[in-house]
Image (tube, rainbow, N blue to C red):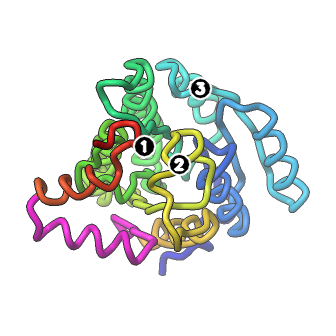
Amino acid sequence: MASTRDYKGKWALVTGASAGIGAALARELATHGAHLILTARRTERLEALAAELTARGTNVRIIVADLNDPDAPQQIYDATEGAGLPVEIVINNAGLGQYSAFHESPIEQEMSQIRVNCEAVVRVARLFIAPMVKRRRGWMLVVASTASFQPVPYISTYAATKAFDRIFALGIAAEVARFGVKVTALCPGPTESEFFEVARAEKFKRRGIQTAEEVARQAVAALARGQRTIIPHLSGRFTALLVRFLPVSLITHFIERAARPKSDEA
């Protein structure tokens, strides 16, 4: 029977591993005996996490890369799978958001979300899924969000990119299942991390948010089972169910009122 024991001795690539859910996923995989390849933009953060995991007996490599650069996925692949290091677990986690009225948001920030949250996810998946299919074994986790289930005003681009991630993961999962490759879409709700501060989205931070460690624990277990979608938080599961029955216009009306920046409130 499939279990997290299957990760032992396998190389796992974690994108966006320098903080938050990415770092928690790396730590969780390490507890199950996986070797780790950590990649992100911030060298110091990667080195600190690598030192922590190495001290616990985990084999760790780091690759500094910015997935806002279209060439970064190929660079990561060339340094790993392309160099003869079989990557059997891919955690497609890197992502970013921005809380702002769309008409006031810097366009480059909007486009960066599309490049990192969508384009890079597809590029990484395409590079690493193909060898998994040939080996007839592998795991890929795509980090989406509960924001993927409905439009979310003031993080409109972010929510749209996460809807892309979720649907993409589900489609790929169906394609590669017959080859023994498991793909899971992780849809966390509000999670304790620096995401809210970086995205300036503290308004979406609510009481009862989950720790990154709890999200990672559930995600890694779901991936081992081959579960296609995992929504770690109860409120997220409720939201995903609710949007099936309520009109989108009604949902977005209430979200817009609740999330409207104070400077725009009339």
Circle number at residue 247: none
Choose between 7 and 251: the one closer to the eye: 251
Circle 1 residue:
129
Image location (x, y in percent) of residue 88: 55, 51
Where disc 2 sits, the SS reads: strand
Circle number at residue 66: 3
Q: Amino acid at mark 2?
A: Val
Where disc 3 sits, the SS reads: loop
Is 252 left, or right, of 182 in this rendering? left
Choose between 115 and 178: the one closer to the eye: 115
> In the displayed structure, would residue 240 be above or below residue 203?
below
**Reading the chain from its start, which is encountered first: label 2 or label 1?**
2
Image location (x, y in percent) of residue 232: 45, 71
How busy is the neighbourhood of tag 3: few (under 14 within 10 Å), some, or many (20 plus)?
A: some
Circle number at residue 90: 2
Image location (x, y in percent) of residue 43: 77, 31
Outermost residue toward the bottom in this view: 1
Q: Amino acid at mark 3?
A: Asp
Image location (x, y in percent) of residue 108: 42, 18
**Reading the chain from its start, which is encountered first: label 1 or label 3?**
3
Is 174 left, or right, of 18 in this rendering? left
User: Which residue is rendered at x = 36% and y = 59% of the image?
Assistant: 146
